[in-house]
Amino acid sequence: MKTTEIFSKGQKVSINFTGEAWLSMLSEDIKNLDTTVYNVTFAPGSRNHWHSHPYGQILLCTSGEGYYQEKGQPKRRLKAGDIIEIKPNVVHWHGATPHSDFVHIGITPQASRNNAVWLGPVSEEEYESY
Amino acid sequence: MKTTEIFSKGQKVSINFTGEAWLSMLSEDIKNLDTTVYNVTFAPGSRNHWHSHPYGQILLCTSGEGYYQEKGQPKRRLKAGDIIEIKPNVVHWHGATPHSDFVHIGITPQASRNNAVWLGPVSEEEYESY
């Protein structure tokens, strides 16, 4: 599935992801707004590592088809228009399905104290399981 | 200009706007995330009143053509892909151009203490001036 993107694709991400992904920072005025906003593009099959955020995160899905999974829960399938609210300290990952790109906007509230805690790759078995 | 929207149009807004506009709340988990995210759709010529936010706001423009103006500054013309970072307490308005719809996502950080301060309508003279 290919769609025209609203925001730029940005730079390739090199750590804490499996497969090819791109990150474009849209807003990062920590001083005045204490919030970061960014566009993430996942190639088919790519995903980020298991991680959590001490103050949570919001995802706005804008194109393609993706997955979101919280530790111990089944994967959720995502498409454009879906919203994910990730509560503080919930361990999870997100990424593309095997045969589609996936693009979401990410919003990190309280960004000055909300660095992600990275917990290692999502295995092929975890990625493929239901 | 008409485009396919990613997020729902929501309900018509009845106060603090001139002309027809629609609001759809996308995320409002104040307790866990203290952030609200919403989609705003402006009919051609419509705009919100002059206002400010004690902790600022971020706009992500997703379709159509709009304006953003800070008090005492010239209007800025907006299109899909543009980002506006509004600093705390800056008096401003946003809306559609006369001949296009305009859609943006709005992000309100620190939402529990960031209610907008509304300051009255943008006059026809202000809307039409450069």
Image (cartoon, coloured by chain):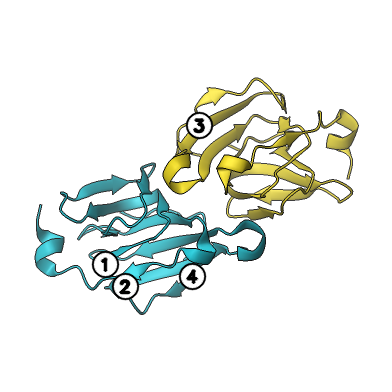
Chain colours: A yellow, B cyan
Give the quarter of the image for residue B46.
Answer: bottom left
Amino acid of disc 2: Glu
Image quarter (top left, top right, bottom left or bottom right) of the N terminus of chain B: bottom left
Which residue sits at x=35%, y=50%?
A: B86
Cβ atoms at labels 2 and 1 below 8 Å apart: yes
Say which chain tag 2 marks. Answer: B
Task: Name the amino acid type tagged 1.
Answer: Ser
> Earlier along the polypeptide chain: callout 1 or callout 4?
4
Q: Residue at x 41, y 70 (%)?
A: B22
Q: Chain of mark 3?
A: A
Give the CA separation, mark 4 to mark 3: 28 Å
Q: Chain of mark 4?
A: B
- Which mark, residue B10? 4
Q: CA distance from mark 1 to mark 4?
A: 16 Å
Using the rendered view, name the quadrant where residue A87 is placed. bottom right
Residue B52 visible, this angle: yes
Residue position for label 2: B20
User: Does the rendering let one see residue B8?
Assistant: no
Mark 2 or mark 3, whichever is nearer to me: 3
